[in-house]
Image (spheres, rainbow, N blue to C red):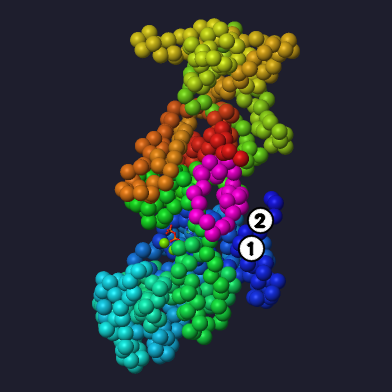
């Protein structure tokens, strides 16, 4: 693709390289907390961090920010690695865990205590919050703020030794309770949690907080540019404060960028967990979810995802991006490389009365109209076919070029047929069959006499078609920003986000497409074979319809 634009982060890196700030090094990290599956918002951060490293010949670490054992699980650690790899990035031996640094973080905390820069506080969580003040109201010193370093050190060691119950003591930095920046009002850096950790087991019952852990982890790993989302802007002075007090091996620069917000969905692990645990969706990889495992199962490609991230770019301004842009990126990717095949979602029987009974023709179908290198297959054609119910109108609307009584249409790559009779169920009146005649001189789907046949429809041979289940998806929420305003985001779920078509019919070649592969069903959209497929019945997810609503 074209060279990425010089966004504000790339300008910072350019300037750092120009003045030799890091000796030409660029070292970033992607630091997920393993408390859920990654979503499309994380993809923005992954593409940015791994992308910068790639572009500047630098390195990017994958680091699990695993300091809150109550919410973290190995399942998430594994899923995150799979998703980053799927996006096309690798970290070689640079995978780390914040929990690897617990011992070092603890030693640094003792140093801060010795320097009189941290103290053990006995106030409860509620008291600490009340003492902290607000934006307009200064904070108040805790009565425990002036404990001596000796006393603090002894108490902190006893905290570690497990002598105190959860919530009875914390370690706080001694910065400034009057600071206009609330974040700097003696932040808590350790709390007691008698909870088993997925990596360190029961070795610890005190766990460090994010603000304290993150900057030190960055410094220990030799990170140069520590990129995070905008809500951490107020935390930057704290990031710098901690690193300035400690003999750490480096002092990375924290840079904030705007998070991605996507319309008609939610990008927050907490909310996604709720959708999964309340069984609104079938699991983390439900194709309706904006999780990377969900969109992968839906049929989105890493190429489309990366293209999307490049197009949305990076800035300091919050914005809401339309899902249609991601769909557009997927269509662009798949248009070039997905095989075209035929499937009928809502079958209507079509009998060609003047076609010999028992005769089968193998019709030559290229897989791609422009790319002959993709090859071709034979599609069986016979007297009895199925076509799409939606391609017939008994009383045709204006500009209707498809099937109607007396109308002539082209059966894709086969023949022109004219509808001569409409058979209805005598009790319900429903159309159950169309009788047609074909013009044998139009073999291949064209005529030398130049007569106009505008409509081309897809079909399958009744005797050769195979059953399939097709799942059609719509947006998960009916409201553009489901979390905006009062009320619960769950109130805005779209009850029609999934439509299951159990009795679709597919041409035989579609049975050979492996799980996970993308194809185009002619005229219907891009589909992907789902893992629920069995040898008896293929299951397809519609990734995206063909029509593009993205306004360029
Ligand atoms: P969530 O609110 O979904 O839990 P998080 O920020 O708490 O997200 P982390 O695991 O801490 O999740 O995120 C890892 C990295 O991904 C962070 O650097 C974070 O800034 C980034 N990130 C998370 N969500 C988005 C988003 N919507 N847009 C851009 N970056 C994001
Ligand atoms: Mg989080
Ligand atoms: Mg976070």
Neighbourhood count class around disc 1 (C-alpha, 10 Å): few under 14, some 14–19, many 20 upward: some
Residue occupying image coordinates x 65% and y 76%: 21
Q: Quadrant of residue 238?
A: bottom left
Residue 499 pos. (x, y %) = 42, 33
Neighbourhood count class around disc 2 (C-alpha, 10 Å): few under 14, some 14–19, many 20 upward: few
On screen, residue 51 above or below 242: above
**Residue behind mark 1:** 10
Residue occupying image coordinates x 27% and y 80%: 122
On screen, residue 500 above or below 275: above
- Secondary structure of the magenta portion, mostly? helix
Q: Which secondary structure lies at badge 2?
A: loop
Q: Quadrant of residue 146?
A: bottom left
Looking at the image, which is closer to me, 5 or 154? 5
Q: How many marks?
A: 2
Q: Earlier in the sequence, mark 1 or mark 2?
A: 2
Looking at the image, which is closer to me, 85 or 183? 183
Residue occupying image coordinates x 40% and y 73%: 180
How far is the residue under mark 1 from the one under mark 2? Answer: 8 Å
Residue 5 shows which numbered tag?
A: 2
The magenta span reads: 304-330
């Amino acid at each position: 693709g074209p060279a990425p634009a010089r966004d504000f982060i790339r300008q910072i890196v350019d300037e750092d390289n120009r003045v030799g700030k890091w000796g030409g090094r660029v070292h970033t990290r992607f630091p997920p907390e393993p408390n859920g599956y990654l979503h499309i918002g994380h993809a923005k951060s992954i593409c940015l961090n791994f992308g910068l490293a790639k572009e500047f010949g630098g390195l990017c670490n994958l680091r699990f920010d695993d300091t809150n054992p109550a919410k973290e699980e190995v399942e998430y650690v594994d899923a995150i690695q799979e998703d980053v790899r799927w996006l096309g990035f690798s970290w070689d031996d640079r995978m780390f865990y914040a929990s690897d640094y617990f011992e070092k973080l603890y030693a640094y905390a003792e140093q801060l205590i010795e320097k009189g820069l941290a103290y053990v506080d006995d106030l409860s969580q509620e008291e600490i919050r009340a003492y902290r003040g607000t934006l307009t109201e200064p904070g108040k010193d805790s009565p425990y703020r002036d404990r001596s370093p000796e006393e603090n050190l002894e108490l902190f060691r006893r905290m570690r030794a497990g002598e105190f119950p959860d919530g009875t003591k914390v370690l706080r930095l001694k910065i400034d309770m009057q600071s206009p920046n609330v974040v700097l009002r003696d932040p808590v850096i350790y709390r007691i949690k008698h909870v088993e950790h997925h990596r360190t087991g029961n070795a610890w019952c005190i766990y460090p907080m994010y603000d304290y852990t993150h900057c030190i982890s960055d410094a220990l790993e030799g990170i140069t540019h520590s990129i995070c989302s905008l809500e951490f802007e107020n935390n930057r002075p704290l990031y710098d404060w901690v690193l300035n007090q400690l003999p750490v091996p480096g002092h990375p620069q924290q840079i904030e960028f705007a998070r991605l917000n996507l319309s008609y969905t939610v990008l927050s692990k907490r909310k996604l967990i709720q959708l999964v645990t309340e069984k609104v969706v079938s699991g983390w990889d439900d194709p309706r979810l904006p999780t990377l495992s969900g969109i992968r199962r839906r049929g989105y490609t890493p190429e489309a995802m990366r293209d999307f991230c490049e197009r949305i770019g990076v800035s300091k301004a919050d914005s809401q991006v339309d899902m249609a842009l991601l769909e557009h990126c997927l269509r662009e990717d798949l248009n070039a490389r997905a095989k075209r095949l035929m499937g009928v979602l809502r079958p209507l029987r079509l009998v060609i009365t003047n076609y010999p009974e028992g005769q089968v023709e193998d019709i030559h179908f290229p897989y791609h109209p422009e790319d002959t290198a993709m090859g071709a297959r034979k599609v069986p054609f016979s007297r009895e076919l199925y076509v799409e119910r939606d391609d017939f109108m008994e009383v045709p609307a204006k500009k209707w070029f498809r099937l109607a009584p007396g109308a002539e249409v082209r059966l894709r790559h086969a023949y022109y047929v004219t509808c001569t009779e409409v058979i209805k169920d005598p009790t319900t009146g429903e159309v159950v069959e169309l009788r047609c005649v074909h013009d044998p001189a139009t073999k291949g789907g064209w005529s030398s006499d130049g007569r106009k046949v505008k409509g081309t429809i897809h079909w399958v041979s009744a005797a050769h078609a195979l059953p399939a289940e097709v799942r059609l998806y719509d947006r998960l929420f009916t409201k553009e920003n489901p979390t905006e305003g009062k009320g619960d985001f769950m109130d805005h779920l779209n009850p029609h986000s999934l439509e299951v078509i159990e009795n679709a019919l597919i041409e035989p070649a579609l049975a050979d497409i492996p799980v996970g592969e993308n194809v185009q069903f002619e005229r219907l959209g891009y589909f992907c074979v789902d893992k629920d497929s069995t040898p008896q019945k293929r299951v397809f997810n519609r990734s995206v319809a063909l029509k593009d609503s993205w306004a360029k």
